[in-house]
Amino acid sequence: MEYEYIFEEVIITERNSPRYLLDGEEVDIWSEEFRPYHSRGVADYIRENLLKFERSGVDPFREIVGKSSEKEMVKTALLSGSNILFKGRKGYGKTTFSKSIAKLLPDKILAVKGCKIHDDPTRPVCFSCKKKLLEEDRVELMWVPKKWIRVSGDPMMTTRQLIGGISLQKIKEGYDFDHPEVFTPGRILKAHRGIAYFDELGSIPSALQTLLHELLEEKQITTPEGDIIPMKLDTLVIASTNPANYKGVSDIKEPLLDRMEEIDIGPPETIEEEIEIGLRNMSLKDGALIPEWHLRILAGTVRCMRSKDCRYASRIEVEPSCRATIKLFDHVRAAATRKGHEAVMLSDYGEKFEMIKLGLKSRIEVDYEDDISKDEVIENVVNDSIDRVCSEIYTAIPRTAFGGLMEDIATLERIDVMKLDGLEEQRYLKSFATSICRKSEEMKSAVEITLEAIARCTGLVEKVATGVYTYTGYDR
Ligand SMILES: [Zn+2]
């Protein structure tokens, strides 16, 4: 008798509805107040909320920097009710993107209290709820916040972890529907009425991918005992895959791929976007300022290592992601803060750029290190990046001010940047340095980069020690 429920599709309407209790009080779930929170699927909610954003002209994925064409594809795919596969290397925001899609789910929904998969009070999926809703005349409900469930791709994953344990045999032996031996949901079933994010879908064993396809497409599960059980799981699947795992052939099985729209997620298109991502995601929110020139040197270093124009392009096997940029910003701020600097100085990179190596060494791979080590590659690329930014700074010095600025430097002769004060008598130097600062605390750093730029671009100034420059313009 009980057995029947398992195969039946149960739909509760106002006519066959039991009485529902929420926090101990009876509620009319068919009223306007509660109607938005049940009887609707994930795709319906997402479609409706996405259209609300579209009509108000607000970008639902504001936390993602740039990526405008990718956002358009995601919106179209979601509106069409499709699952999405993000393809790209680690650290370019696939997870962030998938989390931001969860924003389109309602903040809360109604569910049958005690249900292991948070069943809808009118569309039960698990046997226990089917039975409860048909047999009992009072059913308790609860609010469930939006669900975003991560399923990490693991080659050792078991059926029990992914799908769960379901046994008809145990029911026949007389176990209760709620008994864990009868039904224990796996990760994917826990995403019922929410979003399932498959991190590295291709790493899931192929036999499990077949089960997953059966669940998503046929809405059924085949148990290890061979029973076929209907399971009308309602979930939006967002998956990610790393092209490095491809090696020419996809690890994701054809039938599953056929159920997803593939969207490439690459590195930020511009250095400005790279810097924005770095700043937004830093761990160190306070501390020394990082002036614009340092942001450009650091982000430029990371971007150069990804570029075909990098002099080591053919040697760098694994390129640094945005996480490298984020950590470089953190490390120079940490180093500057430890030394009590108001703003980052070149010395905060470390004598041999140790603070930059700290953030890059684990994030890049260089092929045979026999003739050149990873450390040397980093040192040279950082140096190139300083050169590039210095030449931008040098070019920015107004021609009409250059003579005056050099005279200012000549009067100082030996300049220890950290010991500078007001620069009251060096008005050209002061005026140019001020023009590149966003805040007055950046002044010393601005003078340093100006001197470094003149030293690198002309030789009229020489760096004699870290942060110490002398004028060499006489007689030469
Ligand atoms: Zn249930």
Image (cartoon, rainbow, N blue to C red):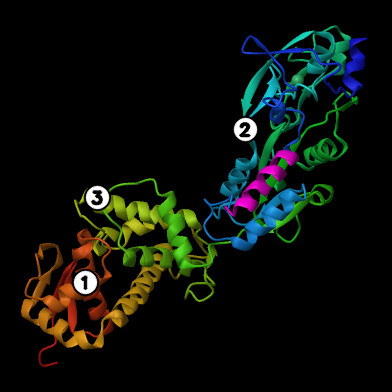
- Residue drawn 46% across the image and 56% down it: 277
Is 212 in the magenta?
A: no
Question: Of label 1 and label 3, which has the lower sequence position?
Answer: 3
Q: Is residue 19 above or below residue 349?
A: above
Q: Amino acid at mark 3?
A: Thr
- Residue occupying the point 87% across, 28% down: 230
Q: Position of residue 104 (x, y in %)?
A: 64, 42
Q: Residue at x 81, y 38 (%)?
A: 216
**Element class at badge 3:** helix
Residue 413 versus residue 306 in the image, above or below: below
Pointer 1 residue? 433
Label 2 sits on a secondary structure element that is loop
Image quarter for ligand 1: top right
Disc 3 marks which residue? 337
Horizontal arrangement in the rendering, residue 316 relative to residue 361 (left or right): right
Q: Main secondary structure of the magenta part?
A: helix
Tell which of 294 and 98 is nearer to you.
98
Residue extending farthest front: 32
Q: Which residues are magenta?
A: 43-58
- Is the residue indicated by label 3 positioned so its CB lies within 8 Å of ligand 1? no
Asked if labels 2 and 3 touch by Cβ distance under 8 angstroms, the answer is no
Q: Position of residue 389 (x, y in %)?
A: 35, 73
